[in-house]
Amino acid sequence: MTVRKYLILLAVVVFGSSGNVCLGRGMRDFGPVNSSNWTRLLIALLNPWVLVGIGLLLLFFCSYLSALSWADLTYVLPATAFGYVLTALLASRLLHENVTVAHWLGIALITAGVGFVATGPSLTAPVESCAATKHPGAHSRELVLTKNARSDA
């Protein structure tokens, strides 16, 4: 994997965690929102913290889409699990949230799974089939599914 791809995964982690923390900080100014006062959410959009959070989450979304363009979802999602650690650190330091030992153990367990996934391939190789020569314009995965459906019938 190239340095550029690592930077994109890092951007996913940093923008996602930072955006969520900014949203959390902004929504503290409003208190609980429920079905009877949902219109307060529109007012929350004027909060500078919420606006910054939305901007950061838009950057998260763009970098996430970029990562998905070159890697499988089953690789990208676990590879960015370090975001849980960063979010907990930022929330405990900046929002003064109480992150318990049980939370840290859960976060560590989730993050440890990254080691298992990150060593595998980032993109599934397309499945080749004999039917691909008969239908050159068709996608190979569709052909395999079609072939399997016919054999099951």
Image (cartoon, rainbow, N blue to C red):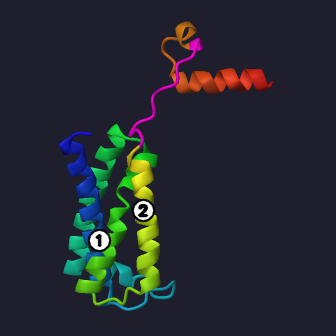
Up-down relation of residue 27 to residue 5 (above or below): below
- First to last magenta residue range: 120-131
Q: Which mark is residue 43?
A: none
Measured from the top left, where is residue 8 in percent x and y?
Answer: 24, 50
Determine the secondary structure under disc 1: helix
Measured from the top left, where is residue 145 in percent x and y?
Answer: 63, 27
User: Mark 1 highlights which residue?
Assistant: 86
Measured from the top left, where is residue 49 in percent x and y?
Answer: 22, 79
The reply to whether residue 100 is in sight is yes
Residue 126 painted magenta: yes
Q: Amino acid at mark 2?
A: Ala
Apparent side of residue 3 relative to residue 19 in the rendered image (left or right): left
Up-down relation of residue 127 to residue 30 (above or below): above
Mark 1 crowd level (few <14, some 14–19, many ≥20, 10 Å Cα): some
User: Mark 2 highlights which residue?
Assistant: 112
For the C terminus, the image quarter is: top right
Q: Residue at x 57, y 16 (%)?
A: 129
